[in-house]
Amino acid sequence: MAGELIWSRTALEDIEGIASSIGRDSFVHARRFVEKVLEEADRVLEQPTIHHPVAQPDRGGPSLRGLYGHRLLFERQGEDLHLLGVIHG
C-alpha cells in the first residue's frame, strides 16, 4: 500500500510562481505544467524507482526528479512522500 503525498507550503508556492510565470505567455502551457507536476508526484509516490533520481533516495535526505527543465525536490519518510519544493534547472 502506498503512503500519502504531502505537499510543503514551499512546494505549492513554487508551483504557483512557475505556473504564473509560464501563464504570462500561455495559460494552456501553465495548466499543462501543473498537471505534469501532479502526475509526476503521484508516479514517484507509487513507483519511486522507475525514474532515475539525481540523488539517490536510499542514501537519506532529499532527492530530485527532473520535469521539463524543473526539479521536484522530495523526501520519503516511511511510506509517505514529502514534496519539499520545485526548482528551475
Image (cartoon, helix red, strand yellow):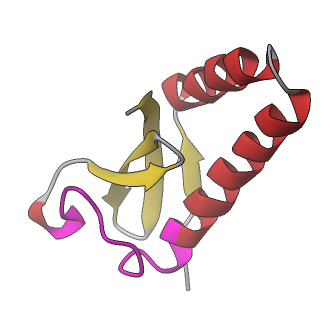
User: What residue is at 37 percent from the left and 33 percent from the top?
Assistant: 89
Q: Farthest residue in the right direction?
A: 28
In terms of depth relative to the viewer, which is nearer, 1 or 40?
Answer: 40
x and y percentages locating residue 50 in the rendered image: 41, 81
Using the image, determine if residue 22 lies above or below residue 85. Answer: above
Choose top left, top right, bottom left or bottom right for residue 57: bottom left
In terms of depth relative to the viewer, which is nearer, 89 or 49?
Answer: 89
User: What residue is at 71 percent from the left and 26 percent from the top?
Assistant: 19
Judged left or right of residue 15, residue 44 is left
Using the image, determine if residue 75 lies above or below residue 31. Answer: below
What span is in magenta? 44-58
x and y percentages locating residue 21 in the rendered image: 68, 16
Q: Main secondary structure of the magenta part?
A: loop
x and y percentages locating residue 51 in the rendered image: 39, 73
Using the image, determine if residue 2 lies above or below residue 23. Answer: below
Judged left or right of residue 28, residue 37 is left
Say if the magenta span includes residue 28: no
Using the image, determine if residue 74 lies above or below residue 13. Answer: below
Q: In which quarter of the image is the N terminus?
A: bottom right
Say if the magenta span includes residue 55: yes
